[in-house]
Image (spheres, coloured by chain):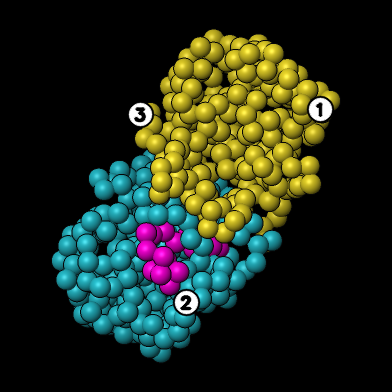
Chain colours: A yellow, B cyan
């Protein structure tokens, strides 16, 4: 079996403040909970500062605060975008100035459902991450955390999460940092998986994981072998 | 760690004759070698019967024959299509009648390279597997074996291959059969991963594996966790 630790990147992410925009959803709350548990100051962002504060209180950990999305973006070192795809472009356009100069981690999966199951949406820019890069020309966009099960992240019985986080981007220091950040979640490795132009299939693969989960009654994740 | 055996499908594939079209390439020869080692009669198909016979002789195993693609298609129970994407549509159009009524396993990856690395091609039908389904209306098309490293398949030192084969298709008995066939390769599990309309991202993900291989000097594969 592959070594469970992240491939070494040399990037120290200790103490970085992490904001999660759209942090009141399951995925956002799950990531917030795990990064707070790893010792990071965490800010949950939401359209409403009140809902953000309530979500932060609900998670109950030390060091989790709630703020309006723009304040969360300004206050953080690294910003995770965990909003539904429907509101993705509009939110990022509104935050372009607040996010300038920051590393923005996009974990949005443009997928939808019909009676035959889950399938990917077509994104004009190629992928949600590439859409973010177009809308945020002054930020460094990295794709990651697409396949992490919110159920597992939020389950206090799950001490370690059994999967690799695929990290995509065109800036080596930024992808190294995000890979190191992923490895702060027990059990998780951050694995570089290509440039941003190869993010579409990673986002869309979430539809396959949904199919796998339905067939096998699982919370499926990916591991990369031989790394 | 996930159980190394295939999720049980109840399908007995013992003794099925497997043809590999485009079987003189590395991927085709690797699959031919492994299925022959598992006791299946194997037919390598090629445009040229002579080249097919030479490739079969080169593998040296018992029970591997070479034939022209059309004869290989007619003689087999299950047919794997392992040709380059460039010749994929044309070959299948020419074999539509020979492949009627058969399970056709498409493992073609529409990817290409430029100086920045590997990236997926746009396929008009969505994916190579969906292209096959359009061209072969009287066959049952299943997508599988996209991510298997030819290097590992051909290496006599590699007893077991550490990956899951993702199996995609719209026909349950056919995907069960192909999952069971995948599990004939030691170390491999066949995992159902969705309908054919979710095959594009699985094919395109090969570009990510190429990126991973370059970064980590690996022969990367996928494992699905919690299955």
Looking at the rendered structure, whether the residues under marks 2 and 1 are on a common chain is answered as no
Which chain contains the residue that carries disc 3?
Answer: A
Q: Contact, CB < 8 Å: mark 2 with mark 1?
A: no
Residue at screen point 55% across, 46% down: B215
Q: Find numbered disc 3 in the image and state the secondary structure of the residue it sits on.
A: loop
Residue denoted by label 1: A60
Marked residue nearer the N-terminal end (1 or 3)? 1
Residue denoted by label 3: A124
Where residue A114 sits, quadrant-wise, is top left
Q: Find numbered disc 1 in the image and state the secondary structure of the residue it sits on.
A: loop
Which image quarter holds the N terminus of chain A? bottom right
Camera-side residue of B24 and A207: A207
Tell me if residue B123 comes above or below residue B91 in the rendering.
Answer: above
Which image quarter holds the C terminus of chain A? bottom right
Residue at screen point 70% across, 40% down: A153
Residue A157 coordinates in the image, percent (x, y)? 79, 46
Residue range highlighted in magenta: B163-178
Residue denoted by label 2: B11
Q: Is residue A200 visible?
A: no
């Amino acid at each position: 079996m592959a070594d469970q630790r992240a491939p070494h990147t040399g990037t120290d992410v200790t103490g970085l403040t992490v904001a999660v925009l759209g942090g009141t959803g399951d995925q956002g709350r799950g990531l917030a909970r795990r990064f707070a548990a790893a010792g990071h100051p965490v800010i949950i962002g939401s359209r409403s500062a009140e809902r953000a504060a309530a979500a932060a209180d609900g998670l109950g950990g030390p060091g989790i605060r709630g703020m309006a999305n723009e304040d969360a973006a300004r206050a953080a070192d690294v910003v995770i975008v965990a909003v539904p795809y429907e509101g993705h472009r509009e939110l990022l356009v509104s935050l372009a100035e607040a996010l300038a100069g920051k590393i923005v981690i996009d974990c949005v999966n443009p997928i939808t459902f019909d009676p035959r199951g889950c399938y990917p949406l077509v994104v004009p820019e190629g992928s949600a991450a590439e859409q973010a890069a177009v809308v945020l020309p002054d930020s460094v966009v990295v794709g990651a955390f697409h396949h992490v099960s919110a159920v597992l992240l939020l389950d206090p019985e799950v001490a370690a999460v059994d999967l690799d986080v695929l990290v995509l981007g065109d800036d080596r220091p930024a992808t190294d940092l995000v890979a190191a950040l992923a490895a702060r979640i027990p059990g998780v490795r951050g694995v570089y998986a290509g440039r941003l132009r190869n993010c579409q299939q990673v986002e869309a693969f979430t539809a396959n994981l949904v199919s796998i989960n339905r067939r096998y009654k699982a919370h499926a994740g990916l591991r990369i072998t031989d790394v």
